[in-house]
Structure formats: structure tokens, C-alpha cells
Image: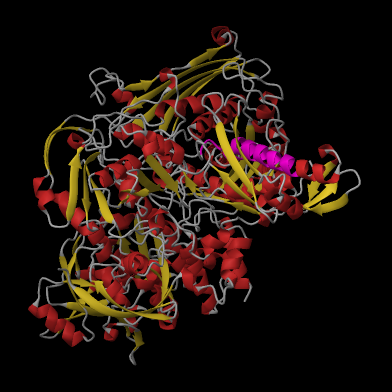
Amino acid sequence: MNEMKKINLIVNDKTYQLEVDIRESLLDVLRNRLHFTGVKEGCSVGECGACTVLIDGVPTSSCIYLAVFADGKKIRTIEGLEKDGKLSKVQQNFIDEGAIQCGFCTPGIVMTTTALVESGNKFTDEEIKREISGHFCRCTGYQKIFDAVKKSLDDK
Amino acid sequence: MGFKIIGSSVNRLDAVSKVTGKAKYTNDFFEREMLCGKVLRSPYAHAVIKAIDVSEAKALPGVIAVFTSQDLPKLKYATAGHPWSIDPKHRDIEDRMILTDKARYVGDSVAAVVAQDEIIAKEALKLIKVDYEVLPHVLDPEKALEKGAPIIHEERPNNIVNDFGNEYGDYEKDFMNAQHIMEGVYDTSIVQHCHIETQTAYAYIDTDDRIVIVSSTQIPHIARRVVGQALGLSWGKIRVIKPHIGGGFGNKQEVIIEPLVAAMTIFSHGLPVRYTMTREECFISSRTRHAIKFSLKTALTKDNKLQAIHVLGISNTGSYASHGHSIIMSATSKFRPLYNFKSFKIEPKTVYTNLPAAGAMRAYGVPQMIFALESHIDDICRKLDLDPIEFRKQNLVSVGHEDPISHVVVRSIGLSECIDKGKELIKWEQKRANYKEQTGDKRRGLGMACFSYFSGTHPVSLEVAGARIILNQDGSVQLQVGATEIGQGADTAFAQMVAEVLGISIDMVHVISTQDTDITPFDTGAYASRQTYITGAAVKKAALEVKNKILTIASRKIGLQIDALDINDATIIEKKLGKEICSLGEIAMEAFYDRTHSHPITSDTSVNIRTNAIAYGVTFVEVEVDMKTGVIEVIEIYNVHDSGTIINHKAALGQVHGGVSMGLGYALSEKLMFDEKTGRPLNNNLLDYKLQTIMDTPKIGVDFVETYEETGSFGQKSLGENPTISPAPAVRNAVLDATGVSFNKLPLNPQTVFEKFKTEGLL
Amino acid sequence: MFSIKKIYQPITLAEALEIYTSNPQLKIIAGGTDVLISLHHGKLDDVELLSIKNLTELTGINYLTDGTIEIGTMTTFTEIFRNEIINKYIPILAEASVSMGGPQIRNNATIGGNICNGAVSADSAPTLFVLNADLRIVNNEGVRIVPITEFYAGPGKVKLQSGEILTHIIIKKADYKGMYGKYIKFSNRKAMDIAMLSVATLGKVKNNKFTDLRIALGVSAPTPIRCTKAESFAFNKTIKEELIKQISEKTLLNANPRHSWRGSKVYREHLIQVLTERALKEIITMSGGKWHE
């Protein structure tokens, strides 16, 4: 039997007490145990950015983050952005700007953008690109993604 | 054309579900006791499998099944996602089995394991003992053609998959009488699709003893057929379901893992088994883009008209035929409605090597061909001191041009206007003049390249598409198509078409996005940029049928002739007067509940399209070359397209942006590399394979010239693949302009540029 | 899922050292961005891990009274490049930190992990080499200080014994005061890439002469290196275009890049010179020097 550990984690404001296999990534637990399937897996080694979630507000590739590391952490996923049935501004901007195509990279980029918006910092165009550069998108050529992020930062 | 909804920028229908994480992709479905499948892959590029011992793997606790080619029916099948051909001569090459008995590339599937979890499955793979007899391998297609080269498939001892060519006109004479004869050799590298969702599927056997496969595929109906063929099962025994998919770009226009995952559930007593390719597997064991080397020779008349062309192409299809033979055919036929060649001779060779199998990838051979052709055109212009834009314009085909082989007719062409727009956007004259005589470390240059592309596959393949519409009580409708939404926005375009025809708003059209071969109408799927053109015709036909049924009831009710009526804003109107008569909902209610005439309105129809429409476009680009490091930076880039009527501008922009970005990666950085000595992949991961990031991607300018194509149901032509075709030659031509150096092999990555500068004496 | 047999997650350094001393087979995991990837690729298998992620003692950046800057090894690259002390006193380290990987990696990857995995392409290394950084290494017995220039043993190898943990990176005031630095990372992409080659230069200019010049290279030898021959050649010579060229050429006396599919030896040697030249010009400009008449 593999080693299990008890962890407490808060996902989208709800507390979960889980016994996780020490071999599991946070991604495994979020998707397979808790069914937060908006968190996508594209490479398993932190290169594509599809599995990005916010851990205590920080964009993190959940595929290279062990579930046992998440003990006591606050996790936010794409499923937690809608409030009272209303999309967040970032989400709405991604729709309106046409930044979504196949949609597989979308949740991760929306989470990173959310962290940028919530940081309250200002970003130049180059800095926006730098902050989004950990996400690969093969559909959009990043044009509309950039527009959606910029609009979200200007919207504040 | 006075459309209301066609041409407007409505938001994607699936945008909300995708931006909230609710959209379900293949791996987002869970079944109780879902098992994990894994594949043992060959470490050798070419080896006979003498024996396999799976006993230890089978004995590992948690392992459900281990199987090899020995356990499977000895059936060879074709994996290319083409419509089935009743004529055996026109079928794809059947050279593949679910698991192989001979390894033909590093990564070939040798054995499969099903286990309770991933770690057990990986452990089990390590316990399988394979006795390989390693054979000499060949990676270079020209070496594969030599006498004595390793034989990759016994059925084709010369390693030639196909070499069927074409010839037209008095080719010999045209070359004899030519004022100038120009020659050039242009080569491309192996690249990969890199859809962010890798190949994935799961399968189980249901209580009716049928195999249900949920798969990330562009072609569910074809997948059903191929699974049947691979396992020797009756096709009706198989059900394929396609949910949302995380990109395809042609790599899911092929039946790669569905037969395997079906076999996995068969060996696991019908329990659900999931098999997802790792990124590393996906790079080498799905498909790649063919590296094709084209040798071009052209004959010019004394007034600089392109008279004749000789195209010699060698296409590296890797270890299995896949789409190979048809890709070079596509490449060498889709460029023909561009320039007015009076004669041509085309000699293609598609060759097996011990590399991963190449298959369909966005624009299907045409980026390779257009790289060659458009580079060659600039080389000609440079040599003869001709203006590259004027030269191209003088040689363009015009409306009425008919291809002598395919008999496809050009019915609309806006390329000349596209060129004018692009030239204006980039300020061609002014900048070209400014960039003469540069000497510094950083030099700028301008380049451009044109292309032509088809809409669908006619006349090579069957072009059948189905659509079904059901009218609801409130006048809204459900639309079902067999063609697939793969991110390109097809569902939204179809909904716009239905709304346009039925005179209802877009939110009254519900598209059932999931394809299920048990339920959805027959359609061959998403490929060849066929959907708005081909499936669009089926959608229009279905909508017209529904409209006709609605107006029939209205006519009966009101007493006016059908022709005198129309639907506008979900209201029945008298056409001439614009007078409102009753709501569409009222008619729908009658259709459902009238005690005498009740007959709910539906349409379930299909089309067999036997035309093609040629789409055009051009790329203009400005680059800056670092003469010391070889780094090329794109400063400005514009793509201008003639795709007929643009159905949805926002979605169309997105297609062009993505296509151009893929084209820039092709031009500058992407290349899948292999070790010559072993055939092993060197960079099959997203760190070492240089897909461009947002920081590497310039602002991409887009414009359209909207011609009206008479054969398109709304005047439309293809757009999906088109934008990826011309960026690479345009970049190459811009680098030529900046540096005077002709790069004849893609990509122009810093190492390559450095080497070339060195040979040219620039460093 | 990763092939992990056991994981220890101590919360104090003392506890960690104790566990490590009695379990010398343990593999240390810091940010996890390297170890977990190695596990995924099967380069590591069935490991027992010692996570130092919870050791808050090892995070943060301190400016000591004598001007020494101390960086805890568990400080992430994002923390470094956003840190005020770093940006004020050693901006070259901020520059190197932000060039590493992509944002999500920088948010978790630690400078200590980057050093200890011994990669020749480590983005932190050339900069720490020119800064003459010292490493504080502790075990159950005590503390030792090692200059980073003596820490690397070969590709993927560092001189860290079992039972030892790297806790801090120490940069002395004399090594940054009045110095200007430039880090150039050369890679095929502007983000999410590893260096094909990297150059860090740090220098002090007085009367248009280099009174101190340090040049370090990444991916130019089996370990990151200092170009000592070029450095001593440059000392106290009047800056001219020709001198910059000569210094850049002399970097090759220490460098010995390898030929690989990522980049040829010839190309790397060429880049070393071109990039050194460019980096030197940047620091000359920053220090108010000039190289052309």
C-alpha cells in the first residue's frame, strides 16, 4: 500500500479534508478526486501552462506541484471565478475579445490574468506578454488573448 | 449580399462553457473503475521483434491485461481520415496494425498494458521482455530510395509509397522555347501540430455488447469505420462519441488510438479503459508534418510570363503511409490555380523512412509547396531584376481558369486586391526604398508571398455532409451536424447560417456540439477547410427545408402563396409589404398540436458537393536580421485573404491569427529533430521543441477581400487552414531582401542562419 | 502520479538536518520544478524525498548592516526579481531571475534548487559567479562557506555531501558596490526556454579603464565558468573598440563549449564573443565609459 497523507485544502472557498497518495500531483487530486476538470493537463511537466491554478494567489503549474504540498493552502481554479451566476470581468473579456478557440489553454490563462488583475499592479505591453508567456496556445496566435488581458487590466 | 447575421461578429456559442471550465473534453468524463492503458514503444528505429515475454508483467498485482500483436487479429488497415472508397483502387494504403510485429521507428507500438493505475501500468511496461533483432535504419528519404536501402515494408521493397504524377501541355516545347529557365531546390523540416490536448480516448463495452469510444477526434464517423476494420468487427457494433476537443490541426484527422483503446477494453472484459498519450509520445507516435524537398524548374517567355513548371518532390512520410501519398498530391495540385502555367510536369515521390509517421497537418502539403514556389518566384525576380509584386500580378490566373487535370474552375479571385491591400498596409514602396544599401549589424527587409487553396477535397474525395434541424414549440431550433467543432468556430458559423435562413436570432439556434455516431448525421468530419463550404451547404439546405415547411403552414393558415411570405425576427411577414402576420412560435405550435395537420417540423438532409472553390491570400512581412547572431525578428506582418463571404469576422480573425502564428513557427523556430545514428527523437517535448510563446509572436495584421463565390451557400470559401500557408516564404523573402541571402530550407533558426552567413562569407 | 516512495516534510532546518543525517538516501526537493520533471521522465524512480518547502528559515532576502546581501535558498525567482534590495543593489540578478523559464516556473522554482541541480545552463549561475557569491552549507555538525565558483563539479554535479543543505547565498558589498552588470541569455525563444548560451558581465570603470571586470559564462564548459584570462587582460587598460574585441576573444581561453543538437561548438564560440562584446558595451555605457572616439 502506498503512503497516504491527510491534507486540508481550500478550493474555491470550500474546505476539503482529504487523504491523498503522496505520489499524486495537485492536478491529479483536483481533477480525478474533486472533479475540477476545468484544470487541464497538456504536458505534465510545467511547460504548457494549461494546468495553472492560483495557490495562495500565485499562478502555479499544478502538474508539478505535489498534492501534499497543498496542505493548508488556498487554491483557486476556473470553476471558482463565477460569482452569483455572473462571469468575472476577465472571463467576459475573454469571450468578447474572441480570445477563445479550442478552449483548452483558456482556463489556465484566465487564472493567470485574474492574478495579474488582482495584484493591482500596472503592466506595460511587454510585461503583459512576459506574464502570459508561461502559457502555450496553438489556436489564437495570442493576439486576442493579449487584447483580453490588456482589457482586463485596463478595466479596473 | 444583404445578410443580417452572416458576416456579423457574434460570440462563439461555446465561449461561456469554455471560459468557466464547464466544457467537457474527453478526459473530463469519469467512469467507475476506470482503468489506465499504456503502450510499450520500441527503442529501436528498425528491428524485428523475435519474441516477447509478457508473463512477468501480467503477474504484477493491479495489471488487468497485457497484449501484443500476437493476440490481435492480423489485419492491416489504413489510418488516414478519408471517406471510405468503394473502389479498391482509390483506397488508402493499408500498412498498419494496432500493435506491430516489427518496429519501424523509435516509438513504434509493441505491446499494450491495462492496469489499475498509471504507476502500475508503467511498472508493467518495464517487466515486458522483448527480444529485438536490430536492423539497419534509414532516416533520409533520398537514401531510402537507393539500391540496397533497408526495406521498411515488405509490400513495398523500394520504399516508395506512391509516385503517381501529372503532366499537362507541351511541356518539352515550352522549355525548349523558353527565354529563361530557372531552377531551385527548396526543403522543409518535420514539425508537429502541438495541439494542447494530446491524443486521448477511453472505451468500454456497453450492455448491448457494443464498443463505446469517447475520443478527441476530428472525424468520429471515420473513426467508427476504421475501428471496425482494425478489429474485424461490424461497423454498427461501434459507437464513437466526440466531445469538446483541445485542438487538432489535422493530427486528429487520423484514427490513431481508437482501435487500440477498443482493444484495451476488449482485453479488460469491457471495463472502461483510458489511454492518453503523454506529450512526449504525442510528438512521435501521433503524426507530424511531412518534410518535403521540392526541386523546381520553370520556363519563362521573353515577356516574363511563367510558361511551364517542372516539380520534383520527395516527401518523407516516415514509417507508415498515413496520409502520405495524398499530401504531396494535394501540395502539387492546390498551387496550380495561382499562376497561369501553360504546361507542367509533376513528379512526386512519397517515401518510407524509419521516422515517426507523417500525416495531415493544417493545409496538407501546401505550406511546403508554397514555400518552394514563392521562394522560387522571388529568386527569379531577383535574378532578372523584376519587381516581385508586379511579376506575380502579371502571372495570376483569372476568373474562368480551369485546371486541366482536376477541372476545378476559378469562379472568384480577389488576390490582386489582396496584394494591393497588403502592400499598402506594410508601406511596401517606402520601406523597400529605405532598406537599400544597409550595412549595420541589424538589417531590415520586406517580403511577400501568395497562395491558393481549395475548399474541401472535391474531386479527389467524396464530399458528403449531413445536417438535421428540429423546430421547437417557441420557434427556436436544434441543429445537429456530423462535422465537428474543433475550436475553429464551425458550430457558430453554422448557427449563423440557420439564423440567417430562418429569420431568427442566433440565440434561437441551439447547436448540439457533441457528435455521436449513433445519433449525428453522417459527415466525414473536420479537415480540408471544408466545413463552412461543404457542411455549410447541408446546413443551408436543411434550414431552407424547415423554412419551406414553416411557410407552408403559414400559407395554409393565411391564404397567401408561400412565395409571398418570409420570416423576419421570428415573425411571419408578407414579403412585399413587410407586414407582420404572426409569430413563428404560433406556426410552430400549429405544427406540433393542430388536431388535423399536426406534423412537427424537422429536416434531416445531406448534400454531396461536386464543386470546389479556390480561396486566395497573401502575406506581407517586415523582418529585422541580427547579422551577428542570426536572430530574425518579425517587425510587422499582414495576412490578407480572399475567402469569399466572411461568415463571422471575429472568428475569422482568430483563424488567421492562429494560422499565421503557426506559419511563423514553421518559418523561424519549429523543427522536430532526430539522432542520425539511432533515429531517436531529440526534442519531443515543449521545452526543446520551439513552439513560439506570446513573447515571440508579433502583432499580426489581418484583412479580407470579400469576393462572392457562386458555389458557396452564402458566397463563402475556405479559410481554416489557409493563413498558415504563406508566412514562411514571405519571411524567407524578407530575409533575402534584408541580407541578399537565399535560405532554401526551413526553419530559419539562429543556428541555421549563422551557418549560412558563414558560408556566404558574411561572418 | 510520480514514483515516490516516501516524503518527509519537516518545518524547521534542525528537523530537516536530523532526518537527512539518519536517511542519507533522501533526495532533496525544493520548488519541485526539476525533481518532479525528472520523475516524470523516469530519470528518477521510486525515490524518497526530503521536502524543504516548509523551511521558512530559508526564504527571504536580507540586507545586513555591513551591506552583505543574504538570499535564502528557498527564495523563488519571482521573489528575487521583484525584490527591492535586489533591484537596488544587484539588478543583474533580477535580470537573470526573470529570464528563467516562465512565470509559473519562476513562482515556484528556487534559487537554491537552481544552483544545486548543477545545470550548466542555470540562469542564476553566471550572475552569481561574477558576484563572487558564497554559499552557506550546513549539516548536523556545523556550517561551511563555499565560493560558488568552487561549487560546481561537472554537468549536473555539485559538491554537496549527503546530509548537507544549502541554506543561503551571500553576496558581499565589495562585490556589487560601484559595479555595473549585464546578463545576456541566448535562447531560441524569448520565454520558456533554457539558455543555449549565457554571459554575465560585471565591472567597474574609472578613467575609462576597467578597474574591475568579471565575465562568467553558462553552457560554455562542463560547469558555469569565469573567464579569468579575459578578466586579467582587461585590467586597467583603456577602453576602446579594439580592447572590447580582444577581451571578448580572450573569453575563449577559458571557454570550451560542447557541440550538441541544441547548438554547435562553432556557433557557441561565436556567440560567446558577440554576446560578451554586447554585454561589455552595455556596462561601459552604464558606468559612463566610452569605447569610440
Q: Nearer the viewer, residue B8 or C243?
A: B8
Name the spot of residue B177 as percent of width and height, x first. Answer: 60, 8
Near-viewer residue (A143 or A22): A22
Q: Residue placed farthest to the front in the image?
A: B595
Q: Is residue B745 in sight in this rendering?
A: yes
Residue C95 versus residue C156: which sits nearer the camera? C156
In this picture, residue A133 sits left or right of residue C121: right
Q: C126 above or below C85?
A: above
Residue at 19 percent of width and 70 percent of height:
C150
Q: Residue furthest bottom?
A: C65
Q: In terms of image quadrants, where is residue C160?
A: bottom left
- Whether residue B453 appears in magenta in the rendering, the answer is no
Residue at image position (17%, 69%) is A2
Q: Position of residue B583 (x, y in %)?
A: 78, 54
Residue pictured at 84% horizontal, 48% vertical: B573
Residue B618 visible in the snapshot: no
Magenta span: predominant SS is helix
In this rendering, the answer to whether A131 lies above or below B345 is below
> Residue B574 in the image: x percent, y percent?
87, 46
Residue occupying image coordinates x 19% and y 48%: B65
Snapshot colouring:
secondary structure
| Left or right of B744 on screen, residue B237 | left
Residue C196: x, y in percent?
A: 35, 54
Tell me if residue B236 comes above or below residue B479 in the rendering.
above
The region drawn magenta spans B527-550
- Which quarter of the picture shows residue B121? bottom left
> How many marks overall?
0
Q: Nearer the viewer, residue A90 or B305?
A: A90
The image quadrant where one finds the C terminus of chain B is top left
Q: From this view, report whether residue B392 is shown above or below residue B260.
A: above
Left or right of residue B36, residue C281 in this image: right
